[in-house]
Amino acid sequence: MTREEAQQRLELCRPGVPDDRQDPALAEAFALLESDAELSAWFEAQQAVDARISQHLEHIEAPADLEHRILAGMRLHAAHKPSHPSTDATQETAENSTPFPSQTRPRILRFAPWVGLAALFLFALILLKLPSESPTPNAYAYAGIPADIPSVIQFLSNEIDSLRPSRFDMRDASVRNLQDYLTSHQSPSPQRLPALLEEMPTIGCVTFEYKGAKLSMICFKNGAVYHLITAEKASYPDELGELPQIFEIQDKAFKLWIEGDQVKILTIHGSQENFPEFI
């Protein structure tokens, strides 16, 4: 099974539904997940997006009169049905047609126009309720995000959620190779790594630009996925404090600190209690 085939099957796995992970049709894809760090990182990001969408759907309330509108539409449609053809016409049609056993038309087909209308109405509600996947830097006003969360943290949270394997600038299991790549491309490269990251295998690196600042991110994988973001202190777009800071946003925790002339940000999925003692 290729990685692309595994992704197609894993997209069927719903977050928070253990039975999906026991589905024999997904067994081969989950087996590949154990040995492919990049596929595993993609799957975790995909599950996080699906979970967020599910949470929004749970809070969508249908209009109180939606059922009444659908039933009224069905009655109106039934009232305007064309009359049955005459007996002679029916017999003539039967004689000139391929003989099949007579069947009653499935009721669902008669209701199809109104079922489709209801589905479109619900889909429009979902589009209005869900946040944009690619907002502009000044459009990160999500419900539930405290006002004191720095804008760059909000930006990074979104980029991590939308990260896909094809987005990596370089994919490599060695952090040294990724550091060399970032340096050779004039991107911020961490001069010093937190101790527990030094020997941890990596997935790849990616660079971002935000408010004129260049940010680099190296993704590590060792059971959980860790993202280490590096920026130059002189070009960092938000106000900095002297002490390390921790922020929680959506389903992620961010730890920010200054190290020499660089700003480091470490992020993991979960809450701040999931942070190992990196620094």
Image (cartoon, rainbow, N blue to C red):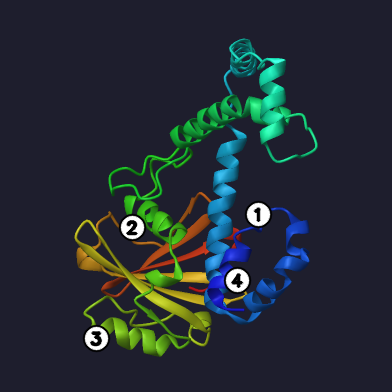
Residue name at image x 61 percent, y 29 percent? 112
- Res. 12 image quadrant: bottom right
Q: Earlier in the sequence, mark 1 or mark 4?
A: 4
Circle 2 packing at 10 Å, graded few (<14), some (14-19), many (20+), is few
- Left or right position of 258 against 101: left
Foreground: disc 3 or disc 1:
1
Q: Nearer the viewer, residue 9 or 63?
A: 9
- The residue sitting at 31% across, 85% down in the picture is 181
- Nearest-to-viewer mark from 2 and 1: 1
Tell me which amino acid carries mark 1. Answer: Pro
Tag 4 residue: 6
In space, the residues marked 3 and 1 are separated at their CA atoms by 39 Å
> Cα distance, mark 2 to mark 4?
44 Å
Residue bearing the label numbered 1? 15
Q: Quadrant of residue 157?
A: bottom left
Q: Is residue 263 above or below residue 73?
A: below
Amino acid under disc 4: Ala
Q: Give the residue pinned by disc 3.
A: 184
